[in-house]
Image: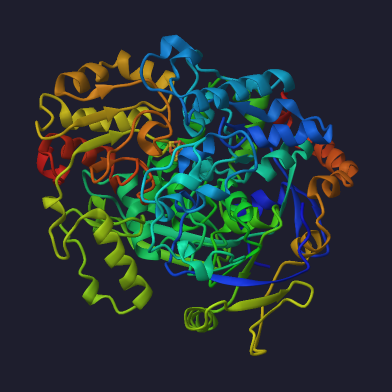
């Protein structure tokens, strides 16, 4: 019999019951909640007179709606009354049901996918869900993590389980080493460029290969975060010393004997040598250039030395139509060099790239330089209160401010512009977030996805440039 | 949940690939703490010429005449015909809520994003996968014939055109059963409460750190 993949192992160890019709009940170890996708689930519980099955697996924080300035005012700092009600509703629900919440004034507050790993609430071998598609982030720890809808949020609250069908196993192997100035963000964008936004549909993707093994936990989180942008609900990376070193000593991590016991179990969390994958894709790390998206889907991406495509060269009529539509929305001409795209704003943040390492990379580029005068705004939004504190302790905030970037309070911010941070119609933004969909960062806004280093370089130049030319 | 057994209705063509959930229901409407009332903001940025705001009377807003749902022939549609990778992006269940609230009962596409596909079944909305060739044909017939209707039979797993041409589709047994009966799957899972408790007891032995030590 063939060996097991990492996904097979995680699935098997959480199988409560296999049903005859092919569906299965899967146990959930960690449930994360935020204000946008949970209110209707709590309301559903109340209407049905149900209680949460197990309180201690739940962890909540407001992140999508929170303002990134004037945090000291707490909930009163939210100007939009509708946003305010949503955050208040989360506070009230957590209080009523006894769920741990890092509220707006808690230093541990932040983007849900940043705070859980930071606290050690994300552990190897867990099943982790959240009413948020970027829950795939947590797969970086050798966990099975994916987004769910609000009905499933209610289902997990009420039963601690989900009804699931097993996904297919897909391996994306990145061989060799990445060049200098090439980051996890570039790797994942290059992967999506290769397999497309539906390339991983129906699959759990394991990322492997030498280039992936060399990534830090922050880098692995960036990678798994965007598995969903390749269509895969779950992305994952096998456990190794990097994983264990990161988890050790975090507040929610096991201690003492239990730590030893846990580490022993976690060491098994990798695919067996003879495991069989349904699909395998291989890339060479050395071939990957810093990436920039030019269109309205993450698969519309190319290297910094590339050009905006010419739809006339595309043979698939549906794709051709997609390119024509995207260029119109983005206000770009066919065959225009990527480096000629001028920018109005820069956003460094989001659950993809707002961790300390991301901020260090960006600060390294802007240090001693000034933001281009043609730029309307360059925002840096740390992923959590603790990331913010760490960055300030390292003096990164000063580097950003001196260079002319704004240093903000933690939250999702301009990633989806549910708070006050947004693009105006027609504005081009170099963004470290994960989605360049029409209107995502503001009505009519034009998003280009890049790494933190590339966003920082673009902030200085006012247009896209190869960050490698600015490093010495 | 509303059951789905059979449905016959007018087809509306959403002729573009990778329709994401931001497009189906933009973020400013996710601030609601209710499950209903999203219909007027379905496809908001495509449907209206101005920028939509929550808590606004959408009946007074300028419509984009080019958007298909604003054309008389598709106004009463209840079946959405779409292209590949429909529903990609965010997990927001507000997307199926908005489609359902507008009056859609089924969506037919060559492929769907996983989370969206799953969310549909929880809301009495049937997502149907047909191959690209059949989809192309259905688009053509929808464009050619005003008031083009399809008849969907979930029990038989078929979609039938007015001329009697029938397309078969696949659907997972458990989801089909729940949708046919309009069942609440939390209630069904709780029938297995003993199995869940037994799992927890065993897991607590092997991995005590997952249970607070
Ligand atoms: S940062 Fe963006 S992608 Fe991440 S959880 Fe927040 S809104 Fe979603």
Residue A53 visible in the shown view: no
Residue at left 41%, top 46%? A223
Q: A259 and A390: which one is in front?
A: A390
In the displayed structure, does residue A86 sit left or right of residue B68?
right
Residue at left offset 49%, top offset 58%: A231
Q: Is residue A3 above or below residue A215?
A: below
Q: Residue furthest front?
A: B60
Count of numbered tags: 0
Q: Position of residue B22 (x, y in %)?
A: 46, 49
| Depth order, front residue of B135/B56 | B56
Most foreground residue, A441 or A278: A441
Position of the N terminus of chain A by quadrant: bottom right
Q: Farthest top residue?
A: A72
Q: Is residue B34 above or below residue B120?
A: above
**Ligand 1 image position (quadrant):** top left
Q: Is residue A125 left or right of residue A248?
A: right
On screen, A123 above or below A307? above
Q: Position of residue A373 (x, y in %)?
A: 9, 31
Q: Identify the residue at image location x=53%, y=38%.
A: B30
- Colouring rule applied to residues: rainbow
Q: Position of residue A173 (x, y in %)?
A: 42, 59
Residue at left 30%, top 79%? A315
Front position in the image: B88 or B97? B97
**Residue A34 in view of the camera:** yes
Which corner quadrant holds the C terminus of chain A? top left
| A384 in relation to A36, above or below | above
Left or right? Give the position of A71 relative to A431.
right
Q: Position of residue A417 (x, y in %)?
A: 39, 35
């Amino acid at each position: 019999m063939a060996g097991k993949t990492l996904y097979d192992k995680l699935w098997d160890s959480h199988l409560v019951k296999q049903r005859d019709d092919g569906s299965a009940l899967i146990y959930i170890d960690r449930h994360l909640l935020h204000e946008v996708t949970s209110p209707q689930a709590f309301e559903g519980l109340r209407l049905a007179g149900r209680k949460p099955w197990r309180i201690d697996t739940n962890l909540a924080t407001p992140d999508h709606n929170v303002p990134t300035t004037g945090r000291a005012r707490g909930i009163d700092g939210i100007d939009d009354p509708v946003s305010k009600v949503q955050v208040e509703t989360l506070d009230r629900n957590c209080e009523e049901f006894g769920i741990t919440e890092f509220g707006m004034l808690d230093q541990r507050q932040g983007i849900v996918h940043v705070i859980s790993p930071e606290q050690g609430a994300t552990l190897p071998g867990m099943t982790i869900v959240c009413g948020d598609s970027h829950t795939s982030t947590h797969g970086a720890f050798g966990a099975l993590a994916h987004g769910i809808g609000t009905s499933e949020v209610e289902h997990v609250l009420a039963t601690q389980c989900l009804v699931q069908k097993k996904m297919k196993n897909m391996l994306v192997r990145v061989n060799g080493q990445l060049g200098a100035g090439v980051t996890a963000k570039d790797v994942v964008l290059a992967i999506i460029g290769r397999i497309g936004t539906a390339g991983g549909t129906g699959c759990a993707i394991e990322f492997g290969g030498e280039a992936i093994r060399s990534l830090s936990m922050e880098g692995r989180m960036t990678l798994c975060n965007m598995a969903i942008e390749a269509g895969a609900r779950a992305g994952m990376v096998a456990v190794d010393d990097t994983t264990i070193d990161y988890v050790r000593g975090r507040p929610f991590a096991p201690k003492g004997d239990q730590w030893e016991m846990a580490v022993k179990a976690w060491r098994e969390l990798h695919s067996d040598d003879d495991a069989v994958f349904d699909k395998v894709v291989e890339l060479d790390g050395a071939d990957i250039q810093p990436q920039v998206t030019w269109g309205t889907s993450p698969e519309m991406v190319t290297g910094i030395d590339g050009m905006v495509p010419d739809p006339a060269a595309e043979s698939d009529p549906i794709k051709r139509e997609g390119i024509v539509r995207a260029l119109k929305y983005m206000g770009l001409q066919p065959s225009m060099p990527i480096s000629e795209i001028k920018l109005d704003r820069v956003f460094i943040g989001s659950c993809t790239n707002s961790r300390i390492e991301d901020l260090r990379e960006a600060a390294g580029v802007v240090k001693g330089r000034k933001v281009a005068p043609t730029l309307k705004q360059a925002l840096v939004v740390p992923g959590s209160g603790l990331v913010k504190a760490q960055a300030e302790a390292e003096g990164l905030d000063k580097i950003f401010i001196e260079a002319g970037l704004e240093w903000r309070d933690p939250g999702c911010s301009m990633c989806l512009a549910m708070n006050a941070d947004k693009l105006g119609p027609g504005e081009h933004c170099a963004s470290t977030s994960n989605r360049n969909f029409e209107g995502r960062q503001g009505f009519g806004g034009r998003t280009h996805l890049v790494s933190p280093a590339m966003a920082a370089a673009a902030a200085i130049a006012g247009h896209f440039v190869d960050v490698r030319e600015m490093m010495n | 949940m509303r059951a789905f057994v059979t449905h016959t209705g007018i087809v509306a063509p959403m002729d573009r690939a990778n329709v994401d959930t931001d497009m189906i229901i933009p973020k400013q409407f996710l601030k609601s703490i209710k499950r209903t009332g999203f219909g007027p903001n379905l496809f908001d940025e495509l449907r209206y010429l101005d920028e939509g705001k929550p808590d606004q009377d959408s009946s007074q807003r300028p419509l984009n005449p080019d958007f298909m749902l604003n054309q008389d022939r598709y106004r009463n549609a209840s079946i959405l015909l779409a292209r590949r990778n429909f529903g990609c992006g965010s997990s927001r269940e507000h997307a199926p809520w908005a489609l359902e609230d507008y009056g859609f009962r089924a969506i037919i596409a060559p492929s769907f994003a996983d989370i969206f596909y799953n969310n549909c079944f929880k809301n009495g909305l049937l997502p149907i996968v047909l191959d690209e060739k059949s989809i192309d044909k259905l688009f053509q017939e929808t464009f050619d014939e005003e008031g083009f209707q399809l008849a969907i039979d979930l029990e038989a797993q078929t979609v039938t055109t007015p001329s009697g041409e029938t397309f078969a589709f696949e659907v997972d047994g458990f989801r089909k059963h729940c949708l046919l009966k309009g069942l609440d799957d939390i209630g069904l899972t709780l029938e297995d409460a003993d199995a869940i408790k037994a799992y927890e007891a065993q897991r607590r032995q092997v991995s005590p750190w997952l249970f607070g030590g």
